[in-house]
Image (spheres, rainbow, N blue to C red):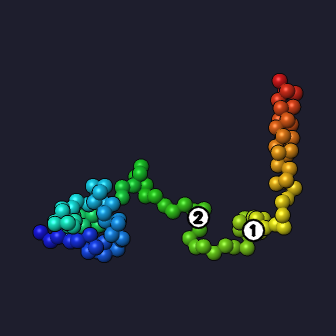
């Protein structure tokens, strides 16, 4: 039985020691107390890192959504460019200064339409 320290286990899994302690506390990784420290069996670590076979849903393998980009590069016609710079201004805009008026106008217009229909 080969026992590893929390630090050795963390290095082996390429995670922080606190992650190993969370795995132990959550029951995901069994450990034993040796003196004042915790030890993890190497076999338990190897079992934790075993690849898991993913079963397809309804006999189909999930594919990457076609609408998602694989890179972070934006094209010139990307809709995100429509909002670039909208957060910058030299002070309050008409909408921000009069938002309550615009909301009230929209609310009363909706009430008027409902009254006219009903």
Q: Secondary structure at mark 2?
A: loop
Q: As displayed, is residue 100 above or below residue 117?
A: below
The residue nearer to you, when weighing 38 against 13, is 38
Q: Quadrant of the N terminus?
A: bottom left
What residue is shown with label 1?
A: 84
Quadrant of res 45: bottom left
CA separation, marks 1 and 2? 20 Å
Q: Residue furthest left?
A: 1
Q: Earlier in the sequence, mark 1 or mark 2?
A: 2
Does residue 25 appear in this view? yes
**Left or right: where 29 falls relative to 19:** left
Q: Secondary structure at mark 1?
A: loop
Q: Residue at x 87, y 31 (%)?
A: 112
| Between marks 1 and 2 in the image, the one whose residue lies nearer the viewer | 1
Quadrant of res 73: bottom right
Quadrant of res 11: bottom left
Percent coordinates x, y for residue 25 in the rendering: 29, 57
Q: Residue furthest front?
A: 36
Q: Are marks 1 and 2 in contact (CB under 8 Å)?
A: no
Q: Residue at x 35, y 65 (%)?
A: 19
What residue is shown with label 2?
A: 68
The numbered dot on residue 112 is: none
Q: Quadrant of the C terminus?
A: top right
Q: Residue at x 27, y 55 (%)?
A: 27
Percent coordinates x, y for residue 36 in the rendering: 20, 66
Does residue 41 appear in this view? no
């Amino acid at each position: 039985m080969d026992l590893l320290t929390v630090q050795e286990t963390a290095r082996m899994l390429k995670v922080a020691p606190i992650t190993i302690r969370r795995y132990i506390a959550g029951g995901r990784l069994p450990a034993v107390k040796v003196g004042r420290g915790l030890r993890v069996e190497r076999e338990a670590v190897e079992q934790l890192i075993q690849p898991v076979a993913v079963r397809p849903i309804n006999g189909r393998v999930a594919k990457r959504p076609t609408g998602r980009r694989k890179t972070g590069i934006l094209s010139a016609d990307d809709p995100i460019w429509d909002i670039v710079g909208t957060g910058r201004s030299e002070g309050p805009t008409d909408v921000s200064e009069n938002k309550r008026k615009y909301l009230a106008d929209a609310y009363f217009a909706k009430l008027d339409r409902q009254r006219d229909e009903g």
